[in-house]
Amino acid sequence: MNFIDKLSAAWTTNNSLLCVGLDPDLARFPDAYKRKPDAIVEFCKEIVDATADLACAFKPQIAYFAALGAERQLEQICAYVRANYPHIPLVLDAKRGDIGATATQYAREAFERYGADAVTVNPYMGSDSIEPYMAWSDRGVIVLCRTSNPGGSDLQFMKVDGQPLYQHVARLVAEKWNSNGQCALVVGATFPEELAQVRAIVGDMPLLVPGVGAQGGDVAATVKSGRTAAGAGMMINSSRAILYAAPQGDEDFVAAARRVAMETRDAINQHRG
């Protein structure tokens, strides 16, 4: 089963468009976990187990692991998700972008080392920096388009042939790069009008939508702007709001994470149509 098929099945099986982000921050872990030698692995496993029936995808952010020298722990977490929840897509949030030879190694990192179903990539260096990922025809290639951060407007609103750059990227991916039908786009929930414009350009292509939860994106506006006619089409990501839902030092972080994940999933579903 390829990435797109797996994602479509997860939308239906779990009745969910919620993507749970895995951004481990030791400073925000419960006190008991801070003292564990495998704190990152154990914490993330608990989150995965608590939310697996509520999520359409899991999205580990590689920087949170690499900054701590915890790539081996990331390998273990990815292996755990694949072994225990093989029906839920695993998206490696890496935002890679480099020349073809280097991109080939980044693709191997994502798809061989971590076994990800999909990876986020940066289109700034053009098609030959994306092609190595496309060689893995069963995996997803999720291209940055309209990002959730305010500074994204510095470049993404620049005009190219009379249209904003992010719209040019959306058309380029939909019309030229998506020859294997494996592409998706990153479009932030913090910009619902732009989200609607991207949806109009790309049809039913999946969208990874960060920005709800800690970043303050509005759930109702996000779903209305980005859903497909079938009421799906999105992986709406929430990371910190779920991971650290419990007050600092509260040991019952698992129950708090599940509660917020369920509330977010249900809020999304209210507006799917």
Image: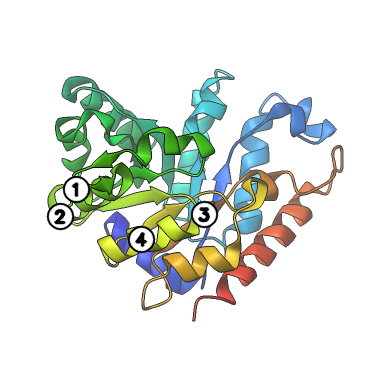
Do the numbered discs 1 and 2 sit on residues whose CB atoms are within 8 Å? yes
Tell me residue 192's x, y (percent): 49, 59
> Looking at the image, which residue is at 68% across and 39% down?
43
Tell me the CA gap for discs 4 and 3.
13 Å
Tell me residue 6's x, y (percent): 35, 61
Name the residue carrying label 3: 189
Name the residue carrying label 2: 175
Q: How is the image coloured?
A: rainbow
Return the residue nearer the eye: 154 or 216. 154
Residue 172: which numbered mark, if any?
1
> Looking at the image, which residue is at 47% across and 32% down?
75
Element type where label 1 sits in the image:
helix
Name the residue carrying label 4: 197
Mark 4 or mark 1, earlier in chain: 1
Badge 2: residue crowd in 10 Å (few <14, some 14–19, many ≥20): few
| Residue 115 visible (yes or no) | no
Mark 1 or mark 3, earlier in chain: 1
